[in-house]
Image (cartoon, helix red, strand yellow):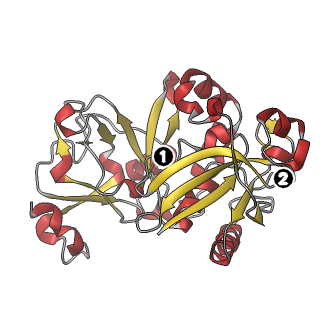
Amino acid sequence: MIKKAVLAGGCFWCLVKPFENFDGIIDIKTGYTGGTTTNPTYKDVCSGIGGHYEAVEITFDDTFIKYEDILDIFFKQINPTDDGGQFVDRGPQYRPAIFFEDNSQKETAEKFIAKLESENIFEDSIVVSVLPLSEFYPAEENHQNYHKKQSAHYNIYYKNSGRYNFVKAFWDGSNPKRKHLKNILSDIQFEVTQNDMTECPFDNKYYNNEKAGIYVDIVGGEVLFSSTDKFDSGCGWPSFSKPVNKNSILERSDFSMGMIRTEVRSLKSNSHLGHVFDDGPEELGGLRYCINSASLRFIPVEDMEKEGYGEYLYLFNK
């Protein structure tokens, strides 16, 4: 079923890119909602006229992506404890909020917030408002897909706004299960998945693995990649042309090491996996998912049924 999710989390430029590569996302518009005036402009909203929020309207097919997953992605882009704005952007138009279109969305949002609160990631309370959706007014054309139209300025803004550093510190560095993971993962697995380390090329478990099977998240067990999409890129790390399911991973900007790259993380466990580049084979789609072996567990095709992954055997029946 086609549905909409309307979310406010500071500057609306930053709430488009995180969603655009997921299966089931049909359209993302930046705009204004929650105020008292009609047809507001960017200038109106910035000046506080009408009391609108900067927000995004996400049109999605819930056959492929659930509302809960959209909320999960959303919360990993914001500071949910700040009701005075978001990061460098201050003022009521930048407050975080979820606008629900029906009672089901309202209940889902409230349960999601309660669960997140119980995980004690933040010292302060979560202050994201859950509000009934009023009219959503699309923003001016120059504010649509700003990360593509003005990519250089967007990257500079995103990196220096405080959002990037916050996300790295609180969402990646405050996993409440870190102590448990430290006890069950090897040193290299922990450093890669929890501290964003990169393992050595040509000296890792799967870079030259040619067996048929699937690669799952070492932390959460979700299926990430298949040997049917693996290729030898010569880089020294396992390389894949695509994930099994795009909704199993989260892609976001990475400004570490003095470079601008696209990091790949597992959506459910928020583990660092590696990076994706656009230098892959054209005949395979042009992408190269360069993934750390330490973030993966390989399951041979002959073991998939007994390991509980029988539903993915179709990948090898082509």
* Viewer-nearest of discs 1 and 2: 2
Label 1 – label 2 distance at C-alpha: 26 Å
Q: Which residue is drawn at 22% across and 59% down?
A: 214
Q: Which is more toward the observer, 75 or 207? A: 75
Q: Which residue is drawn at 40% across and 55% down?
A: 23
Q: Which residue is drawn at 68% across and 28% down?
A: 160
Q: Residue furthest front?
A: 38
Q: Position of residue 98 (x, y in %)?
A: 71, 61
Q: Which is more toward the observer, 51 or 299? A: 51
Measured along the vertical axis of the image, is residue 85 above or below residue 149?
Answer: below
Q: Position of residue 202 (x, y in %)?
A: 22, 35
Measured along the vertical axis of the image, is residue 107 above or below residue 90?
Answer: below
**Which amino acid, mark 1?**
Glu
Where, by quadrant of the figure, is residue 218 drawn?
A: bottom left
Q: Residue 20 carries which label?
A: 1
User: In what quadrant of the picture does the C terminus appear?
Assistant: bottom left
Q: What element carries label 2?
A: loop
Q: Position of residue 258 (x, y in %)?
A: 52, 22
Q: Where is residue 212 in the image (x, y as percent from the top left)?
A: 12, 57
Question: Which residue position holds label 2?
Answer: 35
